[in-house]
Image: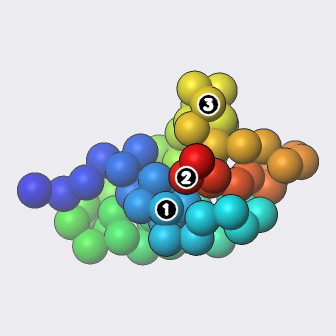
């Protein structure tokens, strides 16, 4: 069973804890993984990154830069 966009985003951030990551490479990686199991590209993965920030799972460092702190 394929992972959700949210799960893929969190997988990427968990592999890079405490690093300031621009959303572009995250979106590219998620899209690449998503297309391995789906015919259409994911819709708006950057919005899911913002939602994860709003839920307190990611830290917004500045515009377009996010960090995952496992603590």
Display colour scheme: rainbow
Residue 21 horizontal side relative to residue 4, left or right: right
Q: Quadrant of residue 26?
A: bottom right
Q: Residue at x 64, y 71 (%)?
A: 25
Is residue 47 visible in the rendered image? The answer is no
Q: Secondary structure at mark 1?
A: helix
Q: Which residue is mark 1?
A: 14
Q: Which residue is mark 2?
A: 70
Label at residue 26: none
- Foreground mark, 3 or 2, reads 2
Q: Nearer the viewer, residue 8 or 35?
A: 8
Q: Residue at x 72, y 43 (%)?
A: 59
Q: Measure the alpha-carbon separation of dots 2 and 1.
A: 8 Å
- Foreground mark, 2 or 1, reads 2
Q: Position of residue 42 (x, y in %)?
A: 42, 52
Residue sticking out furthest to the front = 71
Q: Position of residue 5 (x, y in %)?
A: 39, 49
Q: Residue at x 26, y 62 (%)?
A: 39
Is residue 50 visible in the rendered image? The answer is yes
Q: Which residue is mark 3?
A: 56
Residue 53 horizontal side relative to residue 62, left or right: left
Residue sticking out furthest to the top = 55
- Whether tag 2 and tag 1 are in contact, CB under 8 A, the answer is yes
Q: Position of residue 36 (x, y in %)?
A: 26, 73
Q: Secondary structure at mark 2?
A: loop
């Amino acid at each position: 069973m394929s992972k959700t966009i949210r799960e893929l985003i969190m997988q990427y951030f968990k592999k890079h804890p405490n690093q300031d990551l621009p959303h572009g490479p995250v979106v590219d990686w998620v899209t690449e993984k998503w297309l391995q199991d789906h015919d259409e590209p994911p819709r708006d993965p950057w919005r899911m990154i913002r939602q994860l920030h709003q839920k307190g799972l990611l830290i917004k460092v500045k515009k377009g830069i996010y960090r995952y702190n496992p603590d």
